[in-house]
Amino acid sequence: MKDLDRKVAELSKRRGFFSQTAEAYGGVAGFQTFGPEGAELKRNIENSWRAKFSDELGNREIEAPTIMPEAVFEASGHLDTFDDMIVRCPECGESSRADHIVEDNTELDEAEGLSTEKIEELFQEHDLECPECGESLAGEKVEDFHLMFETTIGPDSGNRGYLRPETAQGIFVEFPRFKDYERGQLPFGITQIGKSYRNEISPRKGLVRVRELTQAELEHFIDPEEDRPPMDEVEDVELKLYSRERQSEKGDLQRLTVRESVEEGVIESEWIAYFLGIATEWYRSIGVDMERFRYRQHQNDELSHYASDCWDAEADVSALGEEEDWIEITGFAYRGCYDLKKHHEHSEEDYTVFKEYDEPVEEEVTEVSPDMAFLGPEYGDKAGEIAEALQEKAEENPEAFEQDEIAVEVEGEEYSIPSERCGFERKTVTKNGEHILPHVVEPSFGIDRMVYTILAHSYDEDEVDGEERTVMRFDEEVAPTEVAVFPLMDKEGLGEKAREVADMLRSEGLSVKYDDTGNIGKRYRRQDEVGTPYCVTIDYDTLEEEPETVTVRDRDSTEQERVRIDELAEHLS
């Protein structure tokens, strides 16, 4: 464990940010409980995200169940592709993530996209060892491990379901309803903040790789031919980009504006570039250190099954002087029409949107109206599929219907249908529009990793009055507590006045903590460690002065000033 990683973990446990779940029963890897400070920090990040990506961008938020039926994940492709590579140690029996062992012990930065056979070769070539006991893993079999948690729905064990591995499918599967709510007008966005579940092989690093996680996702539905993002809103925002080419060359980051990144072809999709610009300003607003931040493009063999292009927002969570430690905090993917097409094909719903033309157009079409009175008795339950195959053939190869017999294939078997039974017809029709499958642009944020990044980037140590202190320099927008109120001591009316001030500030909408235990210096240190921006102290001068004043201490500078109580809320705001 790196030094900063260890310090963040110790502070988080001591001060109530996060800790391993059920430690009274030995704990369980991959599950973390957010304490009072961590839960508030997490809520503040979620609310800030909601304000930006839902409210400000004009998107609508939903809440879908965390368990969904098997058919949803059959359609989405997760049952076939949602795997990681596992290797088991023959000595200690520990299971480990095979690609992580490769990345940690070779010069390869990204091994996730490699085949199991290639990973086995690398284990052999580098004589890689078990991270738990040091036993050689050369020659051990590397296998795919399915990451989804399986369950049953209801008492019938045949009704299989899964805990969702991403919140996105809860949006995609309900798209026919959402397009009606939006009156079929593109573009529009649907957001969701919620839990997802992944049965990670080797959870690690506290909040970074867990089995239960919180995601904040935006699915933005567009007409790929017509819809363009409002680039002028972000065109001058500077992006730090690590493209495929720069990665393969071990080159430096590129610093380009959003506009330049598109014009120079570094980012192919205007929509991806636009959302990188929006997100950059948001990261900065919540306290991400932008000097320890970059956007890294996925390599071709690293892309998810649904994405044509993807850029990860990554944060370096190492300390100054430590080896860099980059973690993914957001994925920006251009998913095309993959998801809607899959659900359109597998379900009984229509996932298309009607796109009206500016002017009606005349178009020649080919249609077949098969004689079902002939097909039914002749081919039984295959009749419907044969009719569909005839229509597809008419659209693809209308000349074929000039023959006496029309050959079509259904489930690998060929059928020959007399042309006079096909009802083939060419005609000109007037069309007012067409049905299209929208494309999807997806920014997907890992909230738990955002919390960890903010903790790592806010952590600091300095010296005050000759004494070392630990201080979390949270941005005021996400700090768990905005102001702490102390009586100098809880006697002679100081405590009553302090509680009165605390209640007044709460009524003004501030997040307030009251503390009267220990000496004032210790109370300041406690609040510094949880990142409270301001401390208000009620002392004897408060009771004697007219108008009443208090001492306000700034967390970062530790400077103090006297402020009138009747002006205190406005001063803090």
Image (cartoon, grey):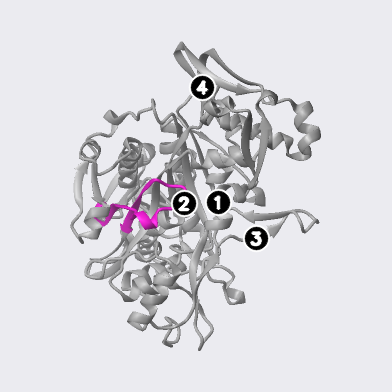
What element does badge 1 sit on?
loop
The region drawn magenta spans 290-315
Q: Residues within 10 Å of mark 3 (few under 14, many from 20)?
A: some
Return the x and y of residue 16 as percentages of the image width and height: 48, 63
Q: Quadrant of the C terminus?
A: top left
- Which residue in the protein does label 4 denote? 434
| Nearer to the camera, 149 or 434 | 434
| Marks 2,4: beta carbons within 8 A | no
Q: In this image, 12 relative to 230: left or right?
A: right
Closer to the chain start, of discs 1 and 3, is 1
Task: Answer above or below: position of 558 versus 268.
Answer: below
Disc number lying in front (3 or 4) = 4
Q: Is residue 499 visible?
A: no
| Marks 3,4: beta carbons within 8 A | no
Label at residue 533 = none
Disc number lying in front (1 or 4) = 4
